[in-house]
Image: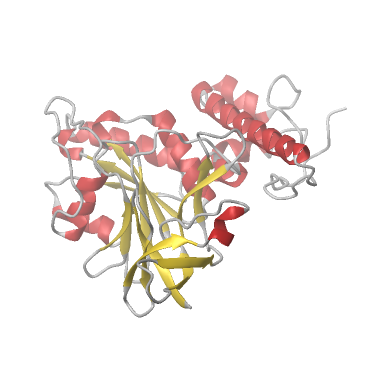
Amino acid sequence: MQKGQVVKLDRGYPLVRTDGGRLVRCEHATALVKGEQVRAVIGDWVEVTVPAGHDKGIIEAILPRTRAFVRKDPTERALPQVLAANFDRVFVAQPLSDMNFKRLERELVLAYETGAAVTVVLTKADLAESEDAVRTVRDHVRELAGPAAETVVVSAAEPASVEAVRALVPPGTTAVFIGKSGVGKSSLVNLLVGHEVQETAEVREGDGKGRHTTVSREMIPVPGGGFVVDMPGVRGLGLWDADAGIEAAFADVEQLAEQCRFRDCRHQDEPGCAVRAAVDSGELSEDRFASYQGLRQETAQVKERREEARRLRGEKASTSGKRRPLKSRKGKRG
């Protein structure tokens, strides 16, 4: 039995680098996937056997994960899908000249939920109209992401900006890039590595967009640093257990909620609601509050569907993933 790490996933079989440095294409043991259909993902540490005369290794076990990037499986009503494991930082990439702030809110929730360090990377800054435009977007993103996340503006024409990203992937660490197709993740990975390791599509001059080219997940070594994983553009970002991520991504709303008169305040028409008061005064924007409420509701619905699925299977109700209690407030309604 050998220990190794999954360093590449494509449409075939996982590629595992063993502790001895050998690269072995592997398949999963039947016993591993038969019951819960568990599959190793990029970054997983696994135990592998290589039977004599067998053309592939066999993944016999997946070792416990330090952290994972999880979304709700877009093809199932109540199943999680793990996209990557055992990383130290999540880079959330968005094009500075074509920001999607609603998507960024959701990406931040998923990134914070992993427990890893979070950095927002604003790509394609060279396409911005002016320095004032760059500062405006950067400041808005910093306000949105909160003090727990770093925000880095990157331009291919400014090597120092690329170095700022490289410094966040020191030796012995792994960083995951997430972002919609065409935001410049692959181009940035190529800049970090110093040569073209990820195929990039031609970009239209008008808007800087291009079709998506990354179809596999691979741990790519950064010279003088750790590893980066360029995740294929993920369209669906359904939330799974996202309470902690929402609390981190919407820390401003959570802090206001701490001041509500009732600890179970729904922030609708309850007396003494500090959140509604902030919205009415303009301290908290209506759009941000709506995003917060929508993501909270989505998470609650996923939990309900999951528990319903457990009941149909005759299992006990889950005790994991419940929202952590907020600090004590004055009392409950009624």
Which quadrant of the figure has residue 252? top right
Q: In this view, which residue lies farthest toward the right?
A: 334
What colour scheme was applied to this rendering of the protein? secondary structure
Position in image of residue 165 (x %, y %):
27, 55
Image x and y of residue 68, in percent: 50, 54
Name the quarter where the C terminus is drawn.
top right
Residue 101 visible in the shown view: yes
- Residue drawn at 26 percent across, 60 percent down: 166
Quarter of the rendering containing residue 41? bottom left
Measured from the top left, where is residue 61 in percent x and y?
54, 67
Q: Position of residue 243 (x, y in %)?
A: 62, 43
Query: Vertically, is 209 above or below 153?
Result: above
Left or right of 291 on screen, residue 102: left
35 and 187: which is toward the camera: 35
User: Is residue 283 visible from the viewing direction of this image?
Assistant: no
Q: Nearer the viewer, residue 195 or 125?
A: 195
Closer to the camera, 150 or 15?
15
Image label count: 0
Which residue is located at x 15 percent, y 38 percent? 126
Examine the rendered structure and indicate whether residue 303 appears above or below residue 207: below
Specify whether 11 is left or right of 258.
left
Tell me which residue sits at (43%, 29%) in the image. 102
Is residue 262 positioned above or below 116 on the image? above
